Image: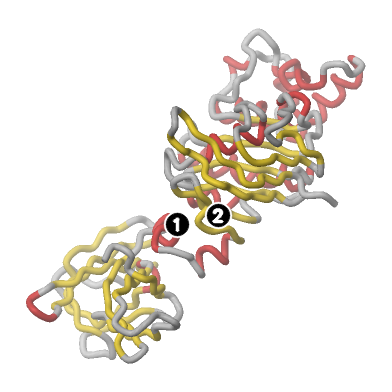
Amino acid sequence: MADALRLEGITHSYDGRVVVDRLDLVVPAGETVCLVGPSGCGKTTTLRLAAGLEPLQQGRVVIAGQVVADGRMDRAPERRGVGMMFQDYALFPHLTVAENVAFGLAGRPAEERASRAREMLEQVALADYAGAYPHTLSGGQQQRIALARALAPAPRLLLLDEPFSGLDTRLREDLRADTLSLLRRNGTATLMVTHDSEEAMFLADRLAVMRAGRIEQQGTPREIYDQPASPFVAAFFSRVNRLDGLVVGGRVSTPVLDLPAGDLEEGRRVEVVVRPEAVRLAPAGSPGTDATVTDVRTLGRASLVRLCMPGSGGREWHLEARLMGRDVPEIGSHVAVSVAAGQAFVFPDKSR
């Protein structure tokens, strides 16, 4: 089976400024790929190029094995066989909910359109609102209607642009779960753009992390979380502690751990990245590095503990630890600090 989407060598500029730079991306059939990155990195432009909403300047767009844009031709959005859903949902205020869902089924018999609209409304648990108008619905209900409309024509590819950004936190969590269930039930290949790392990790079969117009790393959520390719990727998915070090004798020494340097050359300056949940605390005098607790912040199910450790030459090192449960040290207390094996990442320090 052909991949649902292939973007090959995509480059795009606005007023001479490159916003997408030689980008390659694949969305396999039946999978959800999340394109994630900070605002302004080019992810929405990439989505619009896949949809045909921006004229392709360089590269090739292939949908379900068919070239739809390659510099010589650029097929219109309505002829690409894709479903689209954007941040504002773009529901038609003068049409009922059922008419909105059936909008993309133009050209089919009226009975077939009505039947498919009912089916999709049942899937999103809004069949009782078929005769209502969008303005009478909540934001969450509007989101589900927009998703039902996008899926109604059974597109080969679904494109989602920040679909949950306008919703409050609790509702966003519920709708993410409902959307994932709906996508899997329909087997629809999906490319979704988001800047929310947790949302991407929850929804995606594969992630593509974008920075300054380029994809910095692709892989499953677990691969990217456990094996980040750069400090940027590591920090995008969680808070991190950053320590600098020097390769000496094939190892990197930091205030809290000693690591193998891998293939990094002798004398190389490095950056060590450690996530707060990898930092372990034990009573003072236990194996580890002595530290003082400078602050404790309760975050509900977890607590964020800030630590200070004296270094050479009067320098102080600061770390954060994320601890689950209620057993946390008090401010001003002394603890021993260590790091869970395999949860510290060493990168060449490119700032030097």
For the question of whether residue 325 can be seen, the reply is: no
Residue 201, disc: 2
Contact (CB < 8 A) between labels 2 and 1? yes
Q: CA distance from mark 2 to mark 1?
A: 9 Å
Quarter where residue 350 is shown: bottom left
Q: Position of residue 186 (x, y in %)?
A: 79, 42
Name the residue beneath numbered marker 1. Answer: 237
Residue 154, disc: none
Name the image quarter holding the C terminus: bottom left
Residue at x 45%, y 49% (from the top left corner): 211
What is the secondary structure assignment of the residue under circle 1?
Answer: loop
Residue at x 84%, y 26% (from the top left corner): 116
Residue at x 47%, y 38% (from the top left corner): 18
For the question of whether residue 340 can be seen, the reply is: yes
Closer to the camera in the image, 48 or 71: 71
The residue positioned farthest toward the left in the image shown:
314
Q: Position of residue 317 (x, y in %)?
A: 19, 72
The residue positioned farthest toward the front in the image shown:
72
Quarter where residue 222 is shown: bottom right
